[in-house]
Image (spheres, rainbow, N blue to C red):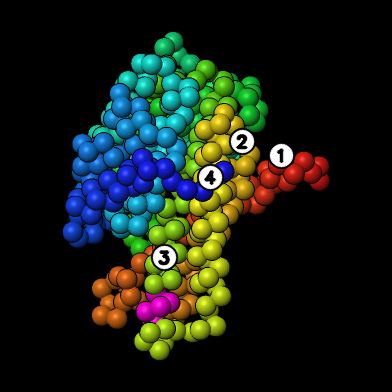
Amino acid sequence: MDLGFTPAQQAFRDEVRSWLAANIPAEPLPPMDTPGGFERHREWERVLHEARWSVVAWPEAYGGRGVGLVEWLVFEEEYYLSGAPGRVNTNGISLLGPTLFAYGTDEQKDRFLPRMASGEEIWAQAWSEPNAGSDLASITTRGVRDGEWFVLDGQKTWCSRGAWADWLFCIVRTDPTSQRHSGLSYLLVPADSEGLERRPVGRLDGEPAFAELFFDGCRVHESNLLGAEGQGWSVAMATTSSERGLNLRAPGRFLAAADRLAGLYRELADGGSADRSLLDEVVRAWTGAQAYRWQTYGTAARLMGGGELGSASSMMKVFWSELDVELHATALRLLGDRGELVAAAPDAVDAGSWMSGYLFALSGPIYAGTNEIQRNIVAERVLGLPRK
């Protein structure tokens, strides 16, 4: 693989960098997991969309620029390095969007993709249940046919953005006699549907980052069925491939954090307060981010050549999630007691972002399928090891 960028790709990087420098908000936006912050982030999605930066790899007909995977990775690098706001519609753009392109009808693509790209409709993922997290095949939420409608009954939990989202993508059991992977269907559900109750779930910081969902006779029209009825597992696996692999966690996120970590070490070292025994950890974090970057570009090259991501996405998920934890933990070890200060404290470093980043990173080995499950997948499907 050629590790260099073409002149056109470099020009694209320069264009992205210039636009972000001129347009990102001068002050950080409020947290997106609050009503006001959610809407401010929706407004930012609209700004990105108007300049055709919200979904650069999508076709122009759906609001994108039609660029390739390499350019999309370049965009992600520049986006995170610029310190631009978080993307409130990540669940839609990064997870459901690719699934719609693969399984959606033309009518579904025309209905949902433009509004997703513009931020007019924000999406939440409604998969996990109280007794079905990483073991997605054990879900029990039912979707019973009633003519042109599915009638949903059951409960979902840990629904990210679920408190404020406009739509949900949901997996339900539409064949009551089925077990495990069979008899599941993938539905797109309006969040304001009658028979759907949303209960925000607060984190330790008090922000309602999640929601519990309760379906009680909630009716969803068959036009919102993505893929064939009873084939929801296959459709869901396309989404999980995006969730664990390229789409959800492109290297730009970790490259930016690793650069910040290296800068933090240099700043502390120049001031004479750095614990120099931690230098090796800083170097390992920075090297890990670079390794993930080039591994991802190699994966992109394989995909552009007609290959598939498949179970390799599980290896990527384990790597980036554990890298994220160790990177932030190293920063906190460098900061010592100051790492625990909240943003408003006079001596807080980087507005307390290292601690908040660490707390978020701890969820990485859990969401998108726990790392224990991912290691089993790698053992069986990549290494060919027998089941115990």
Give the labeled residue for mark 4. Answer: 2
Which mark is first along the chain, 2 or 1?
2
Q: Which residue lies at the image location 35% right of the left edge and 16% below the top edge?
A: 107
Q: Residue 28: give x, y in percent of width and height.
A: 23, 59
Task: Please identify, in this view, whether the residue under mark 3 or under mark 1 is nearer the observer.
Answer: 3
Q: What residue type is disc 2 on?
A: Gly
Q: Position of residue 151 (x, y in %)?
A: 44, 22
Q: Which residue is mark 3?
A: 259
Q: Main secondary structure of the magenta part?
A: helix
Q: Is residue 378 left or right of residue 185?
A: right
Q: Residues within 10 Å of mark 1 (few under 14, many from 20)?
A: some
Which stretch is magenta?
264-268
- Give the image location of residue 199, x and y in percent: 36, 45
Question: Is residue 79 within the magenta segment?
Answer: no
Residue farthest to the bottom, as pictured: 272
Q: Position of residue 136 (x, y in %)?
A: 58, 38
265 in the magenta segment: yes
Please give the residue where the numbered disc 2 appears in the rendered image: 310
Gap in angstroms between the C-alphas marked 3 and 1:
34 Å
Which label lies toward us, 4 or 1? 4
What's the CA distance linking mark 4 and mark 1? 29 Å
Q: Earlier in the sequence, mark 2 or mark 4?
A: 4
Residue mark closest to the camera, 2 vs 3: 3
Mark sitting earlier along the chain (3/1): 3
Q: Is residue 375 above or below residue 95?
A: below
Q: Is the C-beta separation of discs 1 and 2 under 8 Å?
A: yes
Extreme-front residue of the structure: 7
User: Callout 2: 10 Å neighbours few (<14), some, many (20+)?
Assistant: some
